[in-house]
Amino acid sequence: MTKKTAIIGAGLAGLSCARTLRRAGLDVEVFEQDAAIGGRIATIRVGSDAFDHGAQYVCAKSPEFNDFLSEIKDLGYAERWTPQKDGSANLSTPGPWMVGTPGMSSLVRPLTDRVRIDTGRRVHTLEWFGKGWHAWFADDTSAGPFDAVAVATPAAEARPLLGHIEEFADALARVRMAPCWAVMVHIDKQVFPKQDVFSNVSGIIGWVARNNTKPRRNPDEETIVVHATSAWSREAEDLDATAVAEELWDEVSRALRLPPVRPAHMTAHLWRQGFVDQPLGEAYLYSSAHKAGIAGDWCLGGLAEHAFESGDRLGRAIVGALV
Ligand SMILES: Cc1cc2nc3c(=O)[nH]c(=O)nc-3n(C[C@H](O)[C@H](O)[C@H](O)COP(=O)(O)OP(=O)(O)OC[C@H]3O[C@@H](n4cnc5c(N)ncnc54)[C@H](O)[C@@H]3O)c2cc1C
């Protein structure tokens, strides 16, 4: 009989795991708390504009991720982005900058082939009883039994689900993640100096990008994504989103010496588990005794490529145990 597996989290790690399990012939069901898939590889609509408010671009070091990016580029889900940069050392990355098209969230779509995904389903408890794992949701319904379960969420969110397994508890406690405030701004004219991206702008602003310079966006609508530094975001975690948007835009204008311009609209989003401060240092966690595992970018580092590798490696471990 086909073995049934459940994955919690439809970010890049969860969906990369799903693809590996599916390719091995296992039945896969993914539970995602948000209405959309992709996690921090995200594209948000604000009015008629679309902003990539999480990951900005991806690069491949490993042959596996490079192959994946080439594959999805051929399918029309990704293209190369060559923005005007400021030439600072921290913008040097291993390969070309690739972005999802028409939005970053398109990067994960090719991983969903023949995978059942239930969005708007936050799992609050995972429990093994009878013949397998069962997932419980806020409305007191459940799904299961599953022969194995993979949790592909940020470490803090994995803890209430699988932290009761002793061999996972210590590992999860070692990981540290940091918040990031993102601000999406629409302005009616181009006011930036001859550059499309800016990094380490000030102690408050970590990143500014002209989102509309990415391929297959509307080049005529000036859409800006701003990321605050982790240090500032941590201090501002409890602030109101409107106040954050105002403060960060003022800081961008000041630090980049922009001519005064009143945004047509702006909005802020807090990624509570945004960046990885202290990774685990292992590709994934898996317990063959419990038939349960954990994956995420935080296992290896904190980039999209790490999430992809972590999910794939956990998938292979589950296939090895079940097939
Ligand atoms: C602001 C920002 C900028 C970034 N820029 C870049 C960049 O330019 N390049 C790069 O390579 N990386 C970048 N990253 C990092 C990159 O986005 C991440 O490494 C990657 O997306 C992590 O994928 P993941 O699957 O591990 O986690 P996530 O994307 O966080 O996915 C986890 C998923 O689990 C879901 N979930 C959590 N708990 C539950 C639950 N209980 N039940 C159901 N679902 C649940 C969440 O909703 C989410 O969809 C950036 C990140 C941020 C925040």
Image: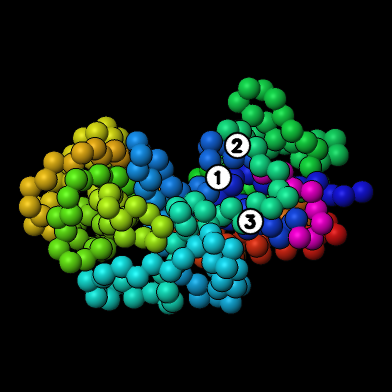
Tell me: 65 left or right of 201.
right
Residue found at x 34% / y 52%: 218
Q: Contact, CB < 8 Å: mark 1 with mark 2?
A: yes
Q: Earlier in the sequence, mark 1 or mark 2?
A: 1
Secondary structure under tag 1 reads loop
Left or right: where does residue 114 sit relative to residue 242?
right
Q: Amino acid at mark 3?
A: Leu
- Judging by the rendered image, the residue that carries numbered circle 1 is 37
Report helix, strand or loop for mark 3: helix
Q: Is residue 169 magenta?
A: no
Q: Badge 3 local density, few (<14 within 10 Å), some, or many (20+)?
A: many
Q: Residue at x 44, y 62 (%)?
A: 99
Residue 93 visible, this orientation: yes
Residue 119: image tag: 2
User: Where residue 4 sits: x, y (%)?
Assistant: 80, 46
Q: What residue occupies the far right of the structure in this picture? A: 1
Q: Which residue is situated farthest in the top direction here?
A: 139
Residue that label 3 marks: 111
What span is colored magenta in the figure? 23-30
Pick the front one: 186 or 291: 186
Q: Are marks 3 and 2 in contact (CB under 8 Å)?
A: no
Left or right of residue 173, residue 322 in this image: right
Indicate the quadrant where residue 188 lies: top left
Q: Secondary structure at mark 2?
A: loop
**Mark 1 C-beta to ligand 1 under 8 Å:** yes
Residue at image coords 70%, 25% = 141
Q: Position of residue 297 (x, y in %)?
A: 52, 58
